[in-house]
Amino acid sequence: MRRIVTTILSTISIMVLLFSYHTSSSSATISASPMVQQPASSDPNPPSGSSKSGGSSTTRPSAAAKASPATSRATYTGQSADTQWGPVQVQLTVQGGKITRARAVQYPQGTNTDAQINGYALPLLDQEVVQKQSASIDTISGATVTSDGYLQSLQSAIDQAHL
Amino acid sequence: MSRKAWVQQIMGMPISIHLRGKDVDSPMVAHVVEDAFDLLREADRLFSTYRDDSEVSRIRRGELDPGHADPLVQQVVTLCRQAGELTKGAFTDQLPDDQGVLGFDPTGLVKGWAADRAASRLADLSGLTFCLNAGGDVVVGGTEPQPETAVDGESGQSNGGSGAAWRVGIEDPRDRSRVAQVVELHHGGVATSGTAARGAHLYDPNAQTFVDRGGSVTVVGPSLMWADVWATALFVGPKSLMLRFSEVAGDYRAISL
């Protein structure tokens, strides 16, 4: 799972650099959205493994999770990328500090189902990640993030990928 | 080369520490990281305006003379005065409270100061590089591991061997899910001031009002504290301040978005 998260996370960075994000739902929209779409394999809670992180560090984020309901999330949508199969556009959802969902919102003609696109879009991007490993972003500088807003932030996804 | 992260909520914000190097899992490393977080907690205890018992709160209520405060508080008072002089008053430690009454509030400087202090503790770790992110302000440093055994066989997460800079994405203030620029650095701070995350909270002492405009200013340089002071000053100050900045802060550069 960790490997997958890392990979997808790197994918975000790649997409940030290569395609430059242009759309997203604002945080207001995010928290207002009652819909939680999650793949069965994802874990809505941050890992509790304080032993794993070597300190008490992960206990506080869980506390923050109480203040900010697990339904709050943020989506990051990359611009369309031209691939050898045609244009692909991927949307990632960050929830509880994790990327809980990656799905293609645009995919080549001739492919009919989301299942199919998800089946190959992510491996495809994975390949790009391997090729452009050095392009990944390590951290985000921006206007001050508060504890309340943390779990929906891209920084939290970066952190979670390395905890 | 492996990488490990720790996150704690201190001073009302997420603070994450990422380390890269060979022995990120050792107990000694965990100990030093905890020390770094302790330094940040100490700063919170002394300087928080949200804690009634902090020294800053006591100074604000007139119960404590700054001259009798903790040496760290006195150090910050001095730095605030210098910051005010350097930025021609665009930085101030006199901020209005909820009732609009001006009072001592060094918050704008303390975050960077405390993060730099924690970073200097992390710099004690040899063979490791670190990246500390305090609510969107970043300080990186550390010593690169020796490049002798550079083959990364276990994880496949090699990022090109030693010497890799930390890549800091600068958030687009108009679309916070987008990264507008990337800054690469091995040592130093990256601070961004803007209203995207918390609304109009940056105070312009000359106009005596909170600044309510979009955009952001990012400053990159050797010290996160000074980068942060300048980012705030350039965001709230007059355009002419950029000239002053280029004159007195030669090691620093600004990115206006």
Image: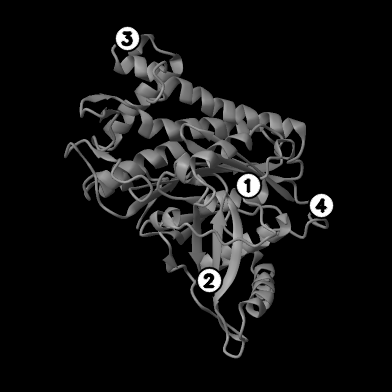
Which one is earlier in the sequence, the residue at label 1 or at label 2? Answer: 2
Dot 3, how many residues are within 10 Å of its Cα: few (below 14), some (14-19), or many (20+)? few
Task: Give the secondary structure at mark 1.
Answer: loop
Residue B174 place in picture, x, y as percent: 35, 59
Is the Cβ of the residue at disc 3 closer than 8 Å to that at disc 2?
no
Q: Residue B149 carries which label?
A: 4
In this view, B94 is above or below A112: above
**Looking at numbered disc 3 in the image, what kind of residue is underneath it?**
Glu
In this view, A10 is above or below B225: below
* Chain on which label 2 sits: A
Q: Distance between the residues labelled 3 and 4?
A: 58 Å
Q: Distance between the residues labelled 1 and 3?
A: 44 Å
The reply to the same-chain question for discs 2 and 4 is no
Image depth: mark 3 or mark 4 in front:
3
The reply to the same-chain question for discs 4 and 1 is no
Q: Which mark is residue A18?
A: 2
Q: Residue A129 carries which label?
A: none
Q: Distance between the residues labelled 3 and 2?
A: 56 Å
The reply to the same-chain question for discs 3 and 2 is no
Task: Write the residue at 39% across / 54% down.
Answer: A28
Q: In this figure, which colouring scheme has been used for the structure?
A: one colour
* Chain on which label 1 sits: A
Residue B8 location, quadrant: top right
Task: Write the residue at 41% across / 25% down.
Answer: B48
Task: Write the residue at 48% across / 25% down.
Answer: B43
Residue B210 place in picture, x, y as percent: 23, 41
Image depth: mark 3 or mark 2 in front:
3
Q: Which of B52 and B104 is in front in this view?
A: B52
Task: Write the residue at 49% across / 44% down.
Answer: A68
**In the rendered image, which quarter contains the N terminus of chain A?**
bottom right
Is the Cβ of the residue at disc 1 closer than 8 Å to that at disc 3?
no
